[in-house]
């Protein structure tokens, strides 16, 4: 009886690992090429400087958070 339980547990574990290996579909928008193409513009990229801080702003925020 113990052999059957062990066999069922191993079979169930192997089935779970098979589900973990399934791949998801690639995103429909925002494809970034694997090769750099300096002439092409990536329209889904953020505007340069829109998501960045100056050194002074970053230092101020870190100090406000309690880091020195």
Image: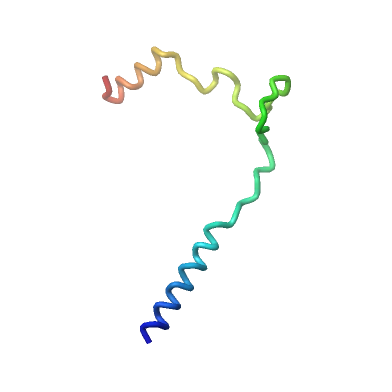
Residue at coordinates 59% horizontally, 25% vertically from top-left? 46
Total tally of numbered discs in the picture: 0
Give the camera-side residue of 22 and 62: 22
- In the picture as drawn, the residue positioned furthest to the right comes out as 39
- In the picture as drawn, the residue positioned furthest to the front comes out as 3
Residue at coordinates 60% horizontally, 53% vertically from top-left? 23
**Where, quadrant-wise, is the C terminus in this rendering?**
top left
- Residue 58 sits in which quadrant? top left
**Residue 60 drawn at (x, y percent):** 34, 17
**Residue 43 drawn at (x, y percent):** 68, 27
User: In this picture, is 16 found above or below 23?
Assistant: below
User: In this picture, is 40 found above or below 17?
Assistant: above
Give the camera-side residue of 59 and 6: 6
Residue at coordinates 54% horizontally, 17% vertically from top-left? 49
- In the picture as drawn, the residue positioned furthest to the bottom comes out as 1
**Where, quadrant-wise, is the N terminus in this rendering?**
bottom left
**Residue 5 drawn at (x, y percent):** 40, 80
Colouring rule applied to residues:
rainbow
User: In this picture, is 58 found above or below 29?
Assistant: above
Residue at coordinates 47% horizontally, 72% vertically from top-left? 12
Q: Is residue 1 left or right of residue 17?
A: left
User: In this picture, is 41 found above or below 1?
Assistant: above
Q: Is residue 25 left or right of residue 54?
A: right
- Residue 10 sits in which quadrant? bottom left
């Amino acid at each position: 009886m113990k052999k059957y339980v062990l066999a069922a547990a191993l079979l169930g574990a192997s089935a779970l690992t098979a589900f973990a290996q399934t791949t998801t579909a690639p995103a429909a928008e925002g494809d970034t090429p694997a090769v750099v193409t300096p002439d092409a513009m990536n329209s889904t990229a953020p505007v340069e400087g829109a998501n960045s801080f100056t050194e002074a702003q970053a230092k101020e925020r870190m100090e406000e958070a309690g880091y020195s």
